[in-house]
Amino acid sequence: MQFQNLKDFKLPPGFRGKPAWFVQTWWLVEMLFFKMSPQFMYGWRRFLLRCFGATIGKKVMIRPTAHIQFPWKLQIDDYSWIGDHVVLYNLDEIKIGSHSVISQRSYLCTGSHHHQNTDFSIYKKPITIQNQCWLAADVFVAPGIDIGEGTVVGSRSSVFKSLPAAKICYGNPAMVIKDRLNHDDILKVVLTPALETSAVELWPGFADYKGLFVDK
C-alpha cells in the first residue's frame, strides 16, 4: 500500500503570492539584514518588513531571531511583540491585533498537507490573533485558528480549535481553563462580598413591630 508519493507533489500556481525571485530576495534580505541586526533596531526590522509588503503598526517589537515566511501575508497592529525564535509560517494570512504578545519559540502555522492524498497536496488557512492576547512560550497554532480578544494560551500548548475571548487556555489540545480577569475585576470579586450589607434586627421579632414606626 502506498500512502504518499512525493514525486507527484505540485505546488499550486500562485501559492506563495509572489514570483520566485521576489520570495528568494526576501529570504536573502531576512538572512543578511533582518537576522543580523542588533536587538534594539526594531524600527529597522519594521522598515524591512514593510518594504516587502507587510502591514506593521507603530511601536511593534520583533526580535531579530523571529522568522517571517512571507511578509506580504502579514499584519501586526500597534504595540504588539514578537519574541525570539518565533516562526510565523504564513503561507496564508496571519493577522495579529494590537497589544498582543507572541512569546519565544511559538509557531503559527497556516499550512499543512492532505495526508489521505498520495500526492501529499498542500493547503492553507489564515490565522487571526485578536487584540490583547498572550501566547506564552512554545505555543503551536494550527491553520484556520482564531484566538479571541484578551485570551492567554499557556506555555507549550497546541491550539487546534479556535478559542473564545477573555479566557485562560492550556493543554494539548488547548482547552479553556477559566476566565481571564484584570486587576479591577479581581478587586470586585474579592471586595464585593465583604462590602455587602444585610438587614439588622434591633431585637428579636423586630420585623413584627416595625410597622408601628411607619406613618400610614
Image (tube, rainbow, N blue to C red):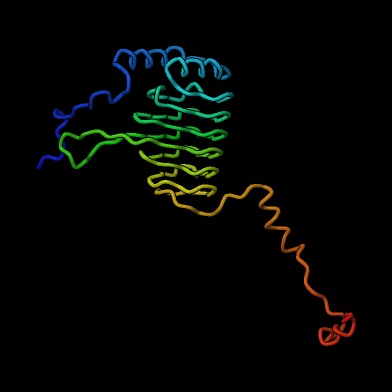
How far across and how far down the image is residue 92, in percent?
A: 35, 31
- Residue 180 versus residue 134 in the image, above or below: below
Number of numbered discs present? 0
As drawn, is 114 to the left or to the right of 75?
left
Residue at horizontal 21%, vertical 34%?
Answer: 121
Q: Which quadrant of the figure contains the C terminus?
A: bottom right
In this orientation, which residue lies closer to the viewer: 156 or 70? 70
Q: Which quadrant of the figure contains the N terminus?
A: top left
- Residue 140 versus residue 46 in the image, above or below: below
Looking at the image, which residue sits at the far front? 216
Q: Quadrant of residue 3?
A: top left
How far across and how far down the image is residue 55, in percent?
A: 48, 23
Residue at horizontal 67%, vertical 52%?
Answer: 186
How far across and how far down the image is residue 176, in percent?
A: 48, 52
Residue at horizontal 40%, vertical 39%?
Answer: 141
Looking at the image, which residue sits at the far left? 1
Q: Quadrant of residue 126?
A: top left
As drawn, is 137 to the left or to the right of 11?
right
- Residue 147 versus residue 42 in the image, above or below: below
- Residue 162 versus residue 138 in the image, above or below: below
In this orientation, which residue lies closer to the viewer: 2 or 92? 92
How far across and how far down the image is residue 177, in percent?
A: 50, 54
